[in-house]
Image (tube, helix red, strand yellow):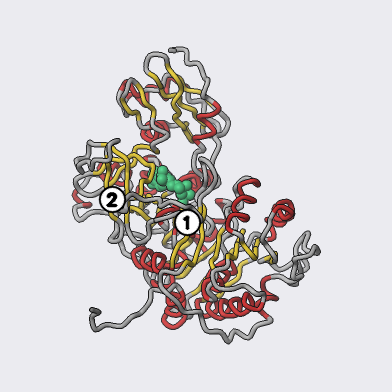
Amino acid sequence: MFGGMQDWPLRIMRLLDYAEREHGGREIVSRWADGSTTRTDWRGVARDSRRLAAALERLGIRRGDRVATLAMNHSRHLVAWYGTIGMGGIVHTVNPRLFEEQLVYIFNHAEDRILFYDHVFAPLVAKIRPQLKSVEHFICFDPGPSGTDAPAEGESRPGNLGIGFEALLAAENGDYRWIEGDEREPAMLCYTSGTTGNPKGVLYEHRSTVLHAMAEVQPDIFDLSRRACVLPIVPMFHAASWGLPFAAPIAGCKIVFTADYTPSVVCDLLHDEEVTHTAAVPTVWLAMMQYADASGRDFGQLRLITIGGSAAPPAMIEYFMKRGIRVGHAWGMTEMSPIGTVGAPPFDWEDLSFDEQVSLTCRQGRVPFGVEMRIVDDEGHALPRDGRSSGRLQVRGPWVVEQYYKEEHKAIDAEGWFDTGDVAILHPDGTMQITDRSKDVIKSGGEWISSIELENAAMGCPGVAEAAAVAVPHPKWDERPLLLVVRKEGSTVSAREIRDHLTGHVAKWWLPDEIIFVETLPHTATGKLLKTALREQYRDYRLQTA
Ligand code: ADP
């Protein structure tokens, strides 16, 4: 038996319809790679999305077909998302920072029929194009160098329409009605970063995306409202820019996109556009902090920065909090659309000392309604939320993956739990603290050393820009930690100084057996430390202590 209320499928296009109707004039600003800036609003995005939907149908794209994008953040990319979803297609955001063979694998696995790309990626597209089996049309987002909508480099080959994105839209009058359907139909395809094995596709649904967006606007998550101006630094190809382009239409906030991540450019935008909210991975903030220190500039009206994707080091959290900026420490993964937990001030925040506030913010926060979370031991028994027990972190909920794209088996257990591969502690107040990836933990004498905690402690040492802790073999202890350190520019910090600093912050038996200084550390395509490469590189490393 049903109740007496209306059946109103949670379809993504309702987000855009709402924004067009209720927040139509709210601005969407794009700072392009060539330095120019354009402005549109939700009305403009809705109009262009209808045009694109019609154009895609004209090109023969059908319901369920995959439409790929290889692009940075800008309003045309947003139109490509909504236009594709509006005509029943599945938008597939591809990370241009992946290795070429991964890119080829992903395009062929997804069987994309169209690729929209930024002009800056034209050389990359030209290079991999002969290996792309399914892509029929390549369409450049940018106007050509002449200022017209000319095709980009290498576009004279077969399969090209010979026109760019704007020309494609201009041929349509925008008289289009969105495709309707079930709320559980797919709408978007995102591949995991693939630090181990081939990348895996996660197929988001209309419902999962809408519920996730509704959760995101909450004060304790992204705190979005009409008064907010959000600059999503996290790229649209990284877990859908953490869902911000779907949450913003609900809130009616202003959006500022940038295709250029140079700290001075981002800083200009913060000031010029009066940005209040942003979100990005720690590596981006590291660069921003260094730029701000060197230039003496501040962050304008910034109120909240969300840091996630890897652990936010305490020194970073402290840096922004001292400047009156709230830090939302978020944890999630592509498999979770991506929000799993976010930190926010508890009711007794004002009673905490500054140091207590910082250490609370170092934890990865709490789940919103819609995510269930637990930790289990190696036998799968649930562990208590006692702030001490550490176990494998599992999640379930309407925006958590059930089955990877084209995989035969489910990714969850019989009770619906998805094992995240992270190791965590749950505290009695509901906050979660990631201690490691299960494959990154350092097992010394049968006990676990948290590589994240070691890295965080090292990064709090003056003169240290970045640090990575990896396990290296040890005859007696099985594994011992090796610490790789990148010094800050001009710093001469020594191994002894770092060790002295660590002594005050971690257990004695956690102290790294050796500290090696390196020029740079490898990062994944989404800006995380590439631990697999480091482990591989130092696999046969012989410690002096061994
Ligand atoms: P994505 O590319 O969307 O970030 P991945 O699957 O590559 O997705 O990464 C998800 C993983 O990133 C998590 O399982 C976790 O290990 C790590 N991660 C994300 N946020 C945090 C955080 N705040 N602290 C520690 N680790 C994090």
Label 1, on which residue?
202
Q: Which residue is mark 2?
A: 373
Q: Nearer the viewer, residue 120 or 487?
A: 120
- x 25%, y 79%: residue: 2
- Label 2 crowding class (10 Å Cα cut-off): few <14, some 14-19, many 20+? some
Horizontal and vertical percent position of residue 66: 58, 65
Quarter the C terminus occupies: top left
Left or right of residue 307, residue 283 in this image: right
Earlier along the polypeptide chain: callout 1 or callout 2?
1
Image x and y of residue 327, in percent: 36, 52
Task: Tell me what residue is drawn at x 39 percent, y 56 percent.
Answer: 402
Callouts 1 and 2 close, C-beta under 8 Å: no
Rate crowding at label 1 as few (under 14), some (14 to 19) or many (20 or more) other CA atoms within 10 Å: many
Q: The residue tagged with tag 2: helix, strand or loop?
A: strand
For the residue pair 428 and 488, the one nearer the viewer reads as 428
Q: Amino acid at mark 1?
A: Val
Vertically, is 27 above or below 268? below
The residue under the point 43% across, 51% down is 409
Q: Can residue 311 be seen here? A: no
Of residues 40 and 447, the one nearer the viewer is 447
- What amino acid type is highlighted by mark number 2? Met
**Mark number for residue 70?**
none
Which of 282/92 is in front? 92
Question: Quadrant where the N terminus lies?
Answer: bottom left
Q: Is residue 199 left or right of residue 170?
A: left
142 relative to 204 in the view: left or right? right
For marks 1 and 2, give the CA distance. 20 Å
**Label 1: which secondary element:** strand
Outermost residue toward the front in this view: 408
Label 1 vs label 2, nearer the camera: 1
